[in-house]
Image: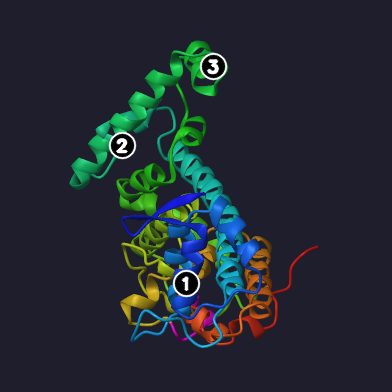
Amino acid sequence: MEVFFLNKVFKSVEEQIKLLESRGLKFSDKAKAQAYLLTNNYYSIINGYSKIFMDSDSDKYISGATFDEIISLYFFNRELRKTLLDSLLLAEHHLKSILAYRFEEYYQGKKEAYLDVSSFNHEKSLDISYIITKISRTITNKSRYKNNAINHYREKYNFVPLWVMVEFLEFGDILTLIKVLPTDLQNKIAHDCYNFIKRENKDSEHGQFSPNIMISFIEVLKDLRNACAHDDVLLNFNSIKTAIYYPYLHDIHDSIIRDDDKTRRTVYCAMIILECFISNNEFAILNNTVRKRFRNLENKVHSVSLDKILSELGFPQEWQRRDPLPQLS
């Protein structure tokens, strides 16, 4: 008989189902549920996705809660992660391109300026030491092997431009590089990112998209990217850092994001932050795909309202009923 380690005691899948039934969870097909629990981690599925279906005052499930609903929420979370990660990778690509271009423009004629401490804001000495060491080690490691761009540039040109180097750096390293740049160079990058969010009404007062705002946004995106890449439950997501309130962006989407720090650490806040780092059409595709994911979930989950799930992710109520954004086919 198949057994699993559960709450420090081994339980068979049959015992797992009996335990869930004793707590009020309904099963439409126990054989199917047993097969599912056999091939999927009980802890990941039940502990990760069933909390929203439980009575807050007991360890019982709310009336009408089903195993199928928990699985539907699990698949929703998986698809939402994939959708967000696609857009996060686009944002990372754009940021790397902008950073490399502006840095090389700023330090024209200075080869591998990113390895020189004088190229950075001296007040950020610890971050400077970290990023220079990280880049140096990456160059050393990659130079040992053929068939990569770092080795090619080192052998042929005896230096590696940043537009090559950035492709070997993680998102967190890009964030660190931006944080230690001189302020005027940070301003150029922030202005380039601001161009993503210019709307049709170009005469309106948008407010300055400062480096501090930009960096706070990237910090939130970094946390979400890590969550998506490591298969985290997004219902539990709160970024470590808080995005700075930027009225032009936040108020366009919803007044729900204002001075409350909690609202600027959620999945919803991170999603709209992406508008600063991807094109209008890329953001429209993201927005409309997430909207579709919620509408599909609404058809499968009935014991709790979709608004409760939206709220857990930081979204406004009935967000899924908003009109889709225009996008190119």
Q: Main secondary structure of the magenta part?
A: helix
Left or right: 59 in relation to 253: left
Left or right: 257 in relation to 136: right
Considering depth in this image, is 121 or 305 the residue closer to the camera? 305
Determine whether 203 is above or below 265 in the image.
below
Left or right: 69 in relation to 327: left
Residue 264 in percent (x, y) is at 38, 73
Residue 135 visible, this orientation: yes
Mark closer to the chain start, 3 or 1? 1
Mark 3 nearby-residue class (10 Å; few <14, some 14–19, many ≥20): some
- Read off the residue under disc 2: 131
Task: Name the residue rendered at 31%, 37% in the picture.
Answer: 131
Mark 2 nearby-residue class (10 Å; few <14, some 14–19, many ≥20): some
Residue 152: image tag:
3
Residue 193 in percent (x, y) is at 50, 58
Residue 250 colored in magenta in the image: yes
Task: Name the residue rendered at 43%, 27% in the picture.
Answer: 109
